[in-house]
Image (tube, rainbow, N blue to C red):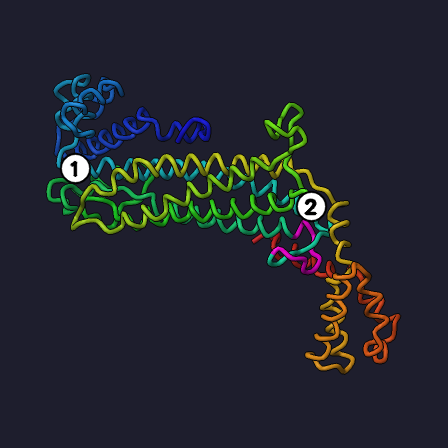
Amino acid sequence: MIERYSREEIKNIWEDKNKYSIWLKIELAAAEAMEKLKIIPKGVSKKVKSKAKINVKRILQIEEKVKHDVIAFLTSITEKAGKDAKYLHKGMTSSDVLDTCFNLQLKQSGEILLKDIDQLLVSIKRQALKHKFTLCMGRSHGIHAEPITFGLKMLTFYQEFKRNKKRLENSIKEISTCAISGAVGTFANVHPQVERYVAKKLKLSVEPISTQIIPRDRHAQFFSTLGIIASSIERFAIEIRHLQRTEVAEVEEFFGKKQKGSSAMPHKKNPIFSENLTGLARLIRSSVIPALENVALWHERDISHSAVERNIGPDATIALDFALARLLNVVQNLNIYPKNMKKNLNITNGIFFSQRVLLEMTSAGFSRDEAYRIVQKNALSAWKENSSFYDKIVSDKKINNKIPVNKLKKLFDFSYHTKKINIIFKRNLKKR
């Protein structure tokens, strides 16, 4: 991922130095286990650990010649650690090191993403509670439907990201496995106890059965989860973009004092962060299909998945970390305009009370079909003429013959649409 969309903590997880450091931890842990099992001489791991140095430049130089990254790594360690290093990697395959390392990097990245989501949840919840009863128009198909509150709108995102947190926790658990099973996963040349020891040392679970590689359905779940989270980010970003349109102007991204919106038009304040989040979501989701396709490998292993994972591992996690941090910044600093929300509520002259009138008419003896036709005619007429829907209803003889005006007036009450808000909030914010 390019620097523009990278944050330091998660970026460091995918640096070569961290990768090779994890490789060394795996090799040393395996050596410790082999010492305990008296497979290799006692003290090897301690001697190697004291002498071994990670030299990224040297490893890459060797790889340029041997065309094998793990061999290049082991050669580099041997150059520093001397003859004791010959006991490293005994009975192991490259995949034992690569897969265990990759899963650990995904776990480390996932834990950062969990922290990001936790911070975002706090901020969304704060906005939801602050605007619990801030009336705004609910829209379906982009068209005014019935009133909701801005707090309720925020609460939907809060609950969605709570689900995302749970999904990510499950996916981290799914991906946190270790395989040290040797060629084609039979343990013919490495003791199963070595795998158990390494797994415990790295705080991973033992892969129940590997085919020389860790099964890629685990990774498919992990990257699919990242894709879902990205889609949630995009849903939030699109909501902000729609509500910031000039004709709506109900919310607005923060705009710095020295910020400029357009190179040509000084008046512009564009929702650039939300638009950026929409683009990043597309990028993150693009890792999902390759991850799914990586599940189907040839026999016990091939490396068709390798190039894919070397790209999507860092790119998807780094991009999602950046996107979550950016969304947090947008939510924390979002400009919210209740007056414009109220203005927009009134632009249709009350036609959104149509359902309430319809229900009252059916209670008064109208058939649903007849009531629907009468209400629809009055609503569309009020909208077309830019006149009061209430006036249309109270002056309709078919309606006022059966429903008194004072009863009709009570139907046009905004509080009707907020009377269950507390119930919704209570069931979504209660401690489980």
Residue 29 included in the magenta stretch of the image: no
* Residue 43 seen from this side: no
Label 2: which residue?
247
Q: Residue at x 38, y 35 (%)?
A: 315
Q: Is residue 365 left or right of residue 270?
A: right
* Residue 66 seen from this side: yes
* Residue 358, image quadrant: bottom right
Q: SS of the residue at dot 2?
A: loop
Seen in the picture, residue 20 relative to 173 is either above or below; the reply is above
Give the position of the C terminus as an image quadrant. Answer: bottom right
Label 2 neighbour load within 10 Å: few <14, some 14-19, many 20+: few
Q: SS of the residue at dot 1?
A: loop
User: Where are the magenta residues, as a range?
Assistant: 142-152
Between marks 2 and 1 in the image, the one whose residue lies nearer the viewer: 2
Number of marks present in the image shown: 2
Q: Residue at x 13, y 28 (%)?
A: 87
Seen in the picture, residue 135 relative to 104 is either above or below; the reply is below
Question: Residue 354 placed where, x, y %?
Answer: 73, 67
Label pair 2/1, CB-CB below 8 angstroms:
no
Question: Residue 248 placed where, x, y %?
Answer: 69, 46
Q: Is residue 180 left or right of residue 4?
A: left
